[in-house]
Image (cartoon, grey):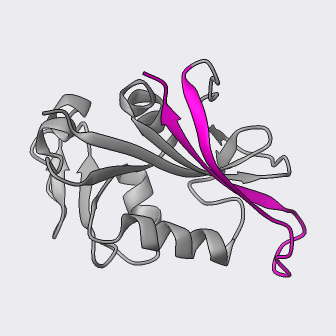
Amino acid sequence: MSKRISIIVAIAENYAIGKDNDLLWHISKDLKRFKELTKNHYIVMGKKTYYSLPVRPLPQRTSMIITDVSGEEIDNCLMAYSIDDAIAKMDDAGENFIIGGGSIYKQFMPLADKLYITRVHKSFDADTFFPEISLDEWELTEKTDVDDDPQNDFTYTFETYNRKR
């Protein structure tokens, strides 16, 4: 049985996702969506992403950290020492969420079944980018536009894609 691998990310128009190991924006609705979708699931991330989290590990989730430092341990987290090791340790029954960063997204993109994208309708200066989403490979199955968020000077869209089979 293959593992269910989903990617969850917020990306700008220019595919920017971060700068200096930090997010480029604060979108409360996006953070709530992230929490609802990932709660009671495995979340898989690189070490820099883990250390950038405001609370570590995130509550009500199983955190898996991918590191290339053999034998490294982080309290209360599952450790994986390669992409293959991470896949082997993923939840067999539930959805596994890839939450970053840039190189982790890039490595899991060909393996993912589903994408949960928050598309921010603005470009940002960044040093970390998400791989391009090819509509030859992905089908948009859900879309919700948000254009009434008083916290931000931009609009955004929640999108869900399924891999075409």
**In which quadrant will I find the C terminus?**
top left
In the displayed structure image, the side of residue 158 where residue 66 appears, left or right: left
Residue extending furthest toward the top: 136
- Quarter-of-image position of residue 114: top left
Start and end of the magenta stretch? 137-165
In the displayed structure image, the side of residue 104 where residue 34 appears, left or right: right
Residue 51 vertical position relative to residue 79 in the rendered view, above or below: below
Q: Considering depth in this image, is 44 or 126 the residue closer to the camera? A: 44
Residue 159 vertical position relative to residue 35 in the rendered view, above or below: above
Regarding residue 76, the answer to whether it shows in the image is yes
In the displayed structure image, the side of residue 26 where residue 33 appears, left or right: left
Q: Considering depth in this image, is 10 or 6 the residue closer to the camera? A: 6
The residue that appears at 29% across and 50% down in the rendered structure is: 96
**In which quadrant will I find the N terminus?**
top left
Q: In x, y percent, where is residue 159? A: 64, 50
- Quarter-of-image position of residue 64: bottom left
Q: Considering depth in this image, is 97 or 147 the residue closer to the camera? A: 147
